[in-house]
Image: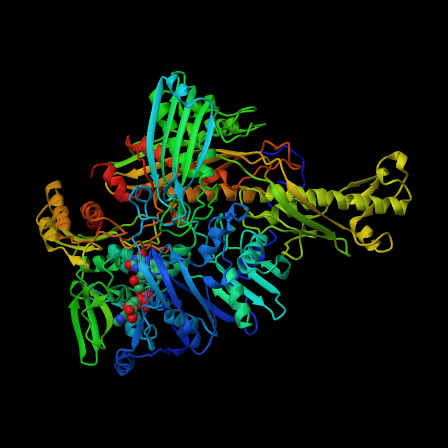
Amino acid sequence: MNAIDNKWIGQRTIRPDGADKVTGRAGYSADNAMPGMIWAKILRSPHAHANIRGIDTAKAAALPGVKAVVTARDITEFPVDTPVMLGIQDMRWMSRNVMAREKALFHGHPVAAVAAISEEIAAEACRLIEVEYEVLPHVIEIEDAIRPDAPLLHDFLRHEGKPSNIASTMVNKLGDIEAGFASADVIIERSFKTRPVHQGYIEPQACTVSCTADGKVTIWSSSQGQFMVRAMTALLTGIPQSSIRAIPAEIGGGFGAKTVIYLEPIAVLLSRKSGRPVKMVMSRDEVFRATGPTSGSMSTVKIGAKKDGTIVAAQGTFHIQAGCLPGGPVRGPVGCSFAPYEIANVLSVGYDVVSNRSKVTAYRAPGAPLGAYATETVIDELAETLGIDPLELRLKNSAGKGTKAAYGAVFGDVTFKETIQAIRNHPHYAAPLDRAPAKGVRRGRGVASGFWYNAGGESSAQLNITEDGNVTVTTGHPDVGGSRASIANVAAELLGIDHSRVSVLIGDTSSIGFSNLTGGSRVTFASAMVVTQSAEKVITQLRERAAKIWKIEPEAVAWSDGEARPAGANAGQFPPLTLKELAAKANEMGGPIGAGVQLTTTGADPGFATHVVDVEVDEELGIIRVLRYTAAQDVGRALHPDYVEGQIQGGVVQGIGWALSEEYLYDKQGRLDNASFLDYRMPVCSDVPMIEPVVLELPNPKHPQGVRGAGEAPLVPPLAAISNAVYDALGKRFYSLPMSPPKVMEVLGG
Amino acid sequence: MTAEMTMTDIRFLAPETLDDAISAYAAAQGAARILAGGTDLLVQMRNGVARPGVIIDIKGIGELTDIAEGADGSFTLGAAVSGAVLGEHPRFGTVWPGVLEAINLIGSTQVQGRASAGGNLCNASPAGDSVPAMVAAGAVVTVQGPKGRRQLAVEAFPAGPGRTNLAPGEIVVSFTLPPRPPGSGDAYLRMIPRTEMDIAVVGVGVNLTLADGVVTAARVGLGAVAPTVLLVADAGRALVGSRLEDAAVDAAAAACRAACNPIDDKRGTIAYRVRAAGVLLRRSVAIAAERAGRN
Ligand SMILES: Cc1cc2nc3c(=O)[nH]c(=O)nc-3n(C[C@H](O)[C@H](O)[C@H](O)COP(=O)(O)OP(=O)(O)OC[C@H]3O[C@@H](n4cnc5c(N)ncnc54)[C@H](O)[C@@H]3O)c2cc1C
């Protein structure tokens, strides 16, 4: 795909963390241990909603082997009337999420924690804690939570002046929505529902924490940001950031969910009280029950178009689950749903709705898949009504340079059209489809598109030349998707040396400058930028050293293929100086060679994706299988194609699960009923076909290598693409997910 | 949230004879659990559901790990034979393809290396995959305890979800599958939302014998739709004497639906399970008949 003549960028090099991972040596969160370490366990609420009248920990504390007990009293209290923001997280809610304060807000909400000399004793001590609950009526589903007579979770939340479970409202507006619909020839309005889905990372949350007598804290844990771990822990414990060192472990998946913490502040408080290192590991049950899935949703989307297919107005109303505390990803559906299209009149409104579920966390392209599910299904219906090919309809209305999006941006060189064209021109779109291959079996094809903002933000890097003339690069970003491999390619390319001579590491909070979260499709974009600038500084130093040795001007020295050379005939005749030679002379010629850059990066252009999928439906059993899937996306530049393709394929697989089989199920008492991988049905390998990524590389002019974020956009189109394909197969539309077999049979009238 | 256990407090025994196993099992007075593949037991121990003081591993006992084909064509299958070992047997899968596919459906490649039909039966899940196929096959279980040996039909073995009709101290020794008349074939199908690593929402085992196109014997086992796996005698009766005409197969499907007494739960609604039972019956009959035609 890429025409640029690069030696390492764009190559499928071996990832730096690969050997450790395939041989089982990589150190994940739960792999750490320390001398004298003790274990902590959490007591969780057995009720979905209850006032906590009192907690008596005396019996637990008296159990032999117990070293410390903590409750919400030990955690910094943030009054509910003053926001305390850390990025998009409000510490008022974070503090109440890690430990219930006034109220237990969901079944599984932490109420107390115990550290003891063994896991068994800690668990036994939890059972000895006496909590006096006043059980309250609970509410789980959005439609119940927004009813006027719904049990209210928080007396401080107001909507339209009245106490409510609607925590906030977000509005994006463009033009005149009424005039827009008045000018439409065709209007389609539909309502949709989706269920919460979990990110499903393999590695449960875990940490080891050591708080020493001098008040210094060290935290080993995996996360999507060691600096986030440090900052949140500091805020929740009152310990200054300078006294906390957060060391990132290898991470076994996060997908957005590890942009917040659950255990670290509790472990810190227990370690401080006990004077011992403390380890905590969540069980899978705890992960499902008490770490955020992403939101379920209730949406209505209305789109009006002219007969020729020009979309003139679009309106969306999105009710998004926040879980038990405010903070659902409302910005996702409100801003992203209509962003791929040039629409003059838009009204997009989102509501953040609390209910007695665990607090939601981010999940790739937070909230955007929910909005795209509704919008892209309505667009499919619109295309059918107007008799226009669904890709042509999208092309006709696609956003381009200068398009103003309802969320505020005026687009630069966006590349949505190219993703549509890539699918339209792909053999998959034209391939014949046997629509009824056997009795009771139907096949269909569907398309959908998606948008994600992408992000820049703070990143730091340090690039050092070792004394023997090799290279170490340190960044501040946990590597969840192969970012070290991409950075190694960039550093080798810029320095003109063999890839094997570059070692890429992730620094801890005390060894590298502040770096924001690995999330929002920002890390490869941002860290390639700071690493590029660091490498450029190092190359300048190397040219200066060579200039000094040759006694010529630095401008007269060029750096290429890993060595300093005279820039031209005028510079004089000198044999080249290699990186190794310059490193050997470093001390005598001016000292160690290395440079770091800390930057708030900008210029992350948005990401677009268009997908096509074929499905097969067993009409007798209601089973839907995905037969073929092709996903086109503009990634700007694939620094390491394997990990870009992996992002696309992984996003699609997660979308298949979301569309067909994954959902949070609650019983009448408000308890999660399927907190295991058996009954929370994520797709397994045999459920998904080989997913073909079509990686477009239309360089982002604002990035040194042309990178655009790649991690979020692939999870935006699948829900609607699959739903549209199922409609194509059956002639019946689904307006709620997942399209599980019993639901399919209901729709088929079985 | 889960209860804890201490692995260190457990005694592990690996007897080499059935008699040793039975006396150790009796001596433990209810504190012991039999370990075959452990793919249920270890999961239950981790969950805190099972907390045995003694574990008796039966995989070292010859009679429990043998596969023997009798001169009359019957098969005797040790209770602890793993799915993978059974799959490699040169003859078993050609004679009982339905029973084999049911056992081989359990779990994944890794699980197959351990999981046994004996464990599947003793775990007594109504959704155990091998059980409906064994019921359809007319398999008989041999059990032995302090009071000696006895035999019972597979369908008489489960007593309810997680409960069996084993007397205290009894161990399942083997399954005996009857000789196959010519023109016989069996099949097992289950409905799961995923393609693997899932638990049956409905499972149907069918075993047919045909002579000149007429069904002379038919047994149907039905799983996951009642507190125990069922033998659906009415379904078998509907097929016997027929040439598998639509009316006969429809009647058998109706009998399966009528036999269902399922629960509405996270794994499937009542309406869905009942409907799917009929669908799977029809599909299993077609496969079994096709196989019978080849034999
Ligand atoms: C990942 C995974 C996937 C699975 N998928 C499936 C599936 O698709 N279908 C399915 O049906 N099951 C499935 N199972 C459950 C399990 O694998 C099966 O039930 C298996 O057949 C159990 O056999 P085992 O030999 O491992 O039994 P064990 O765990 O050793 O024993 C099960 C129970 O039976 C008792 N027991 C075992 N043998 C005897 C004996 N000879 N006499 C008396 N008591 C005995 C044990 O004490 C225990 O209570 C799955 C399990 C896992 C972990």
Q: Quadrant of the C terminus of chain A?
A: top left
Q: Residue at x 63, y 61 (%)?
A: A243
Q: Which of A147 and B193 is in front in this view?
A: A147
Q: Can residue A451 be seen in this view?
A: yes
Q: Can residue A8 be seen in this view?
A: no
Q: Which of A253 and A599 is in front in this view?
A: A599
- Where A114 sits versus A699, above or below? below
Q: Position of residue A502 (x, y in %)?
A: 68, 51
Quarter of the rendering containing residue A230: bottom right
Q: Which colour scheme is used?
A: rainbow
- Where A669 sits versus A277, above or below? above
Answer left or right for A469 relative to B262: right
Answer left or right for B103 relative to A408: left
Answer left or right for A397 relative to A529: left
Q: Nearer the viewer, residue A640 or A101?
A: A101
Quarter of the rendering containing residue B2: bottom left
Answer left or right for A513 relative to A368: right
